[in-house]
Amino acid sequence: MDNSTLPAVAEELLREIKKAFQESSHGTDTFSSRLKFIFGPSAVPALDLVDQRSVTCVRSPSGRTLYQVLGSSGKLYTCYSSCHFCTCPAFGFSVLQKSESLLCKHILAVYLSQAVGACQELAVSEEQLTNILLAEEEEEG
Amino acid sequence: LCRGGLAERLCRLQNRERSAISFWRHQCISDGKTPSGTSGVLIVKILEIFEECTIQVAICQQLEQSPVTLSPEDAVVNAEEPILKVLFTRETAAYLKSRPQDVIHIYPPWQKLLLQNADVPVIMNTYFSQKVPLSEHSEAREKTYGLTKMLIRKNIISLAQTFRLDDLDDKLCQEPSDNQVACAPQIHNNSDSKQHPLALSAVNDSLLEMVERQGAVGWREVQVRVVIQRVYCLPAREGYRSHTQGNKPLLSNGGMFCRLCLLVQDAYGMFSEVQLQSLSSTDDMEQYCRRWEGKSCCLAGMKILQRTTRGRALGLFSLIDSLWPPVVPLKVPGQSQDSEMMTTNLPPPSFCYILTVQSGEMRVEVDEEEQISNLYQPPAVHALKEILRIDGCNERCSFWAQVLYQRLQTKHNVPVDQRDILLFVTDSALQNVVHGIPKVVAVSVTASCVLSMGIREALSAGSRLVFFKDALWGNGRIICVERTVLLLQKPLLCLAAGADLSELTGPVRLDELDSTTQANSVCALRGTVVGVNESTAFSWPTCDRCGNGKLELCPQDRELLYCNQCSEVVTTPVLKMQLEVFLSCPSRSQSTVKVKVWHETGVGVLGTYEVHSVLGKEVGLLNCYVHSVTSHPNCVALEEIVLL
């Protein structure tokens, strides 16, 4: 990780977007082209997910969190908070297998939603959070 | 893509850039030379290249001037020249085919990014880049290099990281508070509005305009006047295919989150679902329904939760469809206030905004004293008989019915108030019908239909007339889902065409068991006892005061029984028995009919529990719930029930 550049660039870009949004709440035109440059084909779909308010931060009483993103097909994907992981097939293929993308559009949508304040919040019980995580396993099994 | 959304803006920007890039490259090729001397051109010499994902990262040295005049031997790396990290997209990299020692001209609009904790600046948006041939020698070298394939190291990025968007002094609570809803109800009545300090602009009548002005200056003061078509409660669930917001856990309905919602419509016909605060008691829902439905109200300080479409929110749109077409002409946007359009041929809406309140800024002012608006469409009440004849699927329907029997779904790990309920209902019209139509209809109540405590008690206790508002009819079944409301009291205004609200006279009759009887239904049967399944028989004592079947042994005297519901010793317990009997029923003679019957000392179908006297006994019309119907073996399993 010490000699990688892209994650630091992506992080800085998202930080700048957040700052710009806090100041004027519609300053993203400046950053749109940078987003596109770094994230390529994921940029527009991710922004669309943000426009649709598709990202929810799910939180349990112990403080555990995860993100649920309602994909464009109507399927709900789970993104982890503590690392870059998403249950969508594009993540498995583009990020894990081919290392072609840094993030899938859902993880990017999570960050963008955080940056522009479009994240929804949902408080659930410990059991419910566990069920969300385990449900993904069952589907793949 | 959302109109005016971030995605759409980026798309437009992209299209402009794409045409600019291809035009520029085309020009370079046709000119045969690169434009020189333009300000803002970055000149770099590549030292090292590697790949990360599909981005090519080139560690470069920034050169002061074009080194065309220098020979390659002179262009030694000077340690004091600034180092840059230049990023190229896959497409640009393929076009450039760069190698170390190449000199690249990067034309504006390139962008520079300074990273925290890093000295080397990053150059991006390098779409307009051109390789510069150094001299004739290097051209020859190019050709030889061109034959050997260059291998570029690829960095695999670790996933064990997250991006932190906050600066150290950012207040983390700032963001969440934007999305939470005020818990204390702050609904103002008309009289309160005069004292409210917040200066509000003139009242608008278009929801779309309010939505489009989100984010612009002064949008918080925008007020929209709408008509409340429906009031209902939505549960907040997780992991389901629609997004609702939930915040702090709810109290009196067993820990299920639940929010009061309004389905509103503006003068242009556009609908919106407004999610208000959480209710502390679902009994208030009935009150809000009665006080607010049909009235006008002013919304202000709303925030867009979601823009949903027909395909994603079938339940919401089935309700919207039941309110379409509007009963009064709609306003036409962009034209003068007087012009209105007839609504007979307008297609129903295909999208709907879901709004919620900003914390501390909810302004929903309902003119309760005002008259019912002309735009309001009260629920059209039909008789059960008519509903059974409806052709379509996913149609919302409203009706009155008497609840005869209730059956809870038997999932034990689900709390009682989140289980699905099966209700069996009837009305006097169905009871009086002779042939062709069932006397009793099953209504499924899913866990997503929020029931008040009052309704739950009424469903368990006595047979009451219940009003089912906006239930769903489809595939031959009536189901109560999200946005269906069950009420005990007659709504003030409803179109009661054909509805029969008369009380049932005489005892309720169920359809008799026959060849068409299906599982999970109720029926009446008669027959002769042909066998007794003694292995299933068991008996237990019950309290003679309250009927509690779970008596305990007295701690003081273990010979006596104790009822902890009455908190007293039970001196004369009533012995209840249950056993399975086999009947021969003339109405369904081909099947083995197995009925679980109840028996109390002196009471009950069998009269006595002596096996010998039971065999051959005639069992008169018995009300039963059908557990299962199987064809191989041909068997019907039922359970005796008591109607409410």
Image (cartoon, rainbow, N blue to C red):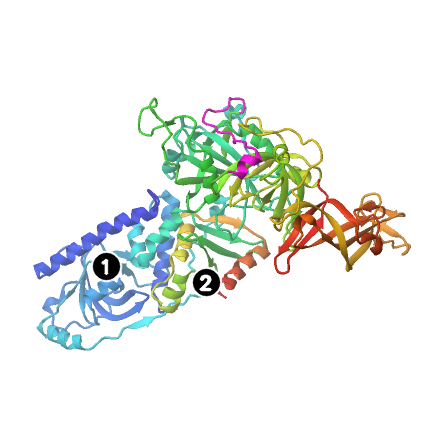
**In this image, B92 relative to A16: left or right?**
left
Q: Nearer the viewer, mark 2 or mark 1?
A: 2
- Measured in 3D between alpha carbons, the distance from the residue under mark 2 to the one under mark 1, in whole angstroms, is 30 Å
Q: Nearer the viewer, residue A101 or B221?
A: A101
Instruction: Tell me if residue B384 is in the magenta stretch.
Output: yes
* Chain of the residue where label 1 is placed in the rendered structure: B
- How would you rate the neighbour count of disc 1 (Cα within 10 Å): few for under 14, some for 14-19, many for 20 or more? many
Quarter residue B45 falls in: bottom left
Q: Which residues are magenta?
A: B368-389
Q: In the displayed structure, does residue B476 sit left or right of residue A111? A: right
Q: Which numbered marker is on residue A99?
A: none
Is residue B472 rendered to the left or right of residue B589? left
Q: Residues within 10 Å of mark 2 (few under 14, many from 20)?
A: few
- Magenta span has B222? no
- Respond whether the residues carrying marks 2 and 1 are from the same subunit: no
Which residue carries the number 2 mark? A83
SS for callout 1: loop
Q: Write down the residue under mark 1.
A: B126
On the image, the x and y values in percent for residue B299 come to 46, 32
Which of B606/B212 is in front? B606
Amino acid type at circle 1 is Thr
Q: Is residue B445 or residue A135 the one in the foreground? A: B445
Q: Position of residue B88 (x, y in %)?
A: 25, 63
Residue at the location (53% across, 30% down)? Answer: B293
Q: Residue A13: x, y in percent?
A: 35, 55
Compared with B290, B144 (above or below) is below
Which amino acid, mark 2?
A: Cys
Above/below status of A137 relative to A49: below
Q: Quadrant of residue A126?
A: bottom right
Residue B425 position within the rendered picture, expressed as x and y whole percent measured from the top left: 63, 39
Element type at mark 2: loop
